[in-house]
Image (cartoon, helix red, strand yellow):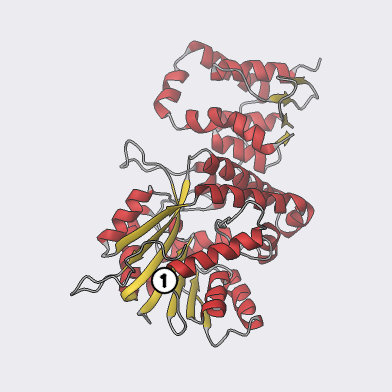
Amino acid sequence: MQDAALRLRSLVEQLLGAPLPVRIRAWDGSEAGPPAAPVLVVRNRRAVRRLLWKPGELGLARAWVAGDLAVEGDLYTALGLMSGLLWERGEDARGTAQALRDPEVRAALRGLVKLAGPLPPAPPGEEVRRRRHLHTKRSDRRAISHHYDVGNDFYEVVLGPSMVYSCAYWESGEATLEEAQRDKLDLIARKLDLKAGQRLLDVGCGWGSMAIHAAREYGVSVVGVTLSQEQAAYARKRVAEEGLTDRVEIRVQDYRDVADGPFDAISSIGMAEHVGAERYLEYAEVLHQLLRPGGRLLNHQIARPPRRDESAYSVDEFIDAYVFPDGELAPVGTTVTQLERAGFEVRDVESIREHYALTLRHWVTNLEAQWGRAVRLTSPGRARVWRLYMAASALAFERNRIGVNQVLAVRTQEASGASGMPLRARTWN
């Protein structure tokens, strides 16, 4: 008798105390749930065991990455329907503890164990073993290597020709991803007021796109630093092909080891998320010291909303285990405060949250269009990590669960306090 889906749906709804918004297809071919909803394909009992032993986001991610779970239908719709069961419930530890004392919940758990088996499977090989978030130079190199040394060919699949791994800036909805990334780089260059002959430090330079744009379009000399060997090799090749080796130097170097300042401007685009809360003031102070008086910093960084208890340490379990080990998000107000504590004057903050949602949807489209190649370049599990991570992140930006901000700050003249900024705000528009 094929009834695993019905039994599974009944037990999960008893456990959650709410209807399951997606349809289930179980390993025995049975189906249960709303007929028109996306289908959550539970390919084996192991998927249920993963969710039992690690309820919520991380258990779901492990089952997805291992190929024990799949979605038929629109992935965004499925994630959107399940978000209330994953994000909101997963954040309430006290509510979870209370639920476990409920006899009906305990009975449902026993039923699921009987259905799926008692032993937890090992996490997929793509998962990083969790460590303390020390943010030493050694641990940062290891974390960056995990994320960025997946392979340049794989990133070409996802990012497209621009090879820019941060949110684009959409002047219009009709622009291509490459046009929107070019517009983002140019917006940053204008905010920094780059001029020929100046020196720019690009912290976390990636595959060299900002460094190349600044040197080619604005005539500046650029030092780009990254901790990824693969990124650096790729960026140097691009610099040489552009004929810019006399103006762009790409280094494998920690930003804390840069000793040849001062620079006229510093760009930090999508790098500060790796710094960590305990190291953020140090990061800001180092960049302040590397700037000449009157120099500008453009800090482009993902942010999260503030929590009621900011003293409690919290990371996204899936992101930490599979995507950005040691990554930490802070509220934009915290970022501004730390920059000011380091001596910067913050002159402009621009939220471009919706732009990141658009960017991520384009990256998902790129990945899905070349899925077979992406799998060959990495592994089926790694490709699944990226599809889930980017689709879920797009929804998180759209629903204002996370944001992204460009913070423009200046190192003022010590004696006079002069900023060198024009009287009229936003001259880059």
Residue furthest front as drawn: 424
Query: Quick check: 275 left or right of 2?
Result: left
Query: Quick check: 187 left or right of 336?
Result: right
**Can you see residue 258?**
no
**In terms of depth relative to the viewer, which is nearer, 322 or 115?**
322
Report x, y in % for residue 111.
62, 17
**In terms of depth relative to the viewer, which is nearer, 406 or 139?**
406
**In terms of depth relative to the viewer, which is nearer, 274 or 427?**
427
Which residue is depicted at the point 68% across and 46% down? 384
Report x, y in % for residue 365.
71, 50
Report x, y in % for residue 62.
61, 40
Q: Is 117 situated above or below 129?
A: above
- The quadrant of the picture occupied by the N terminus is top right
> In which quarter of the view is residue 281 placed?
bottom left
Report x, y in % for residue 140.
46, 62
- The three-letter code of the residue at mark 1 reads Ile
Residue furthest top as drawn: 103
Which residue is depicted at the point 59% across and 62% down? 181
Which residue is depicted at the point 71% across and 35% down? 71
> In which quarter of the view is residue 8 placed?
top right
* Numbered disc 1: secondary structure: strand
**Can you see residue 406?**
yes
Residue furthest left as drawn: 415
Badge 1 local density, few (<14 within 10 Å), some, or many (20+)?
many
Q: How many marks?
A: 1
Q: Is 248 situated above or below 327?
A: below
> In which quarter of the view is residue 366 placed?
bottom right
Give the residue number, with chain letter if any, for mark 1: 266
Query: Quick check: 369 left or right of 276?
Result: right
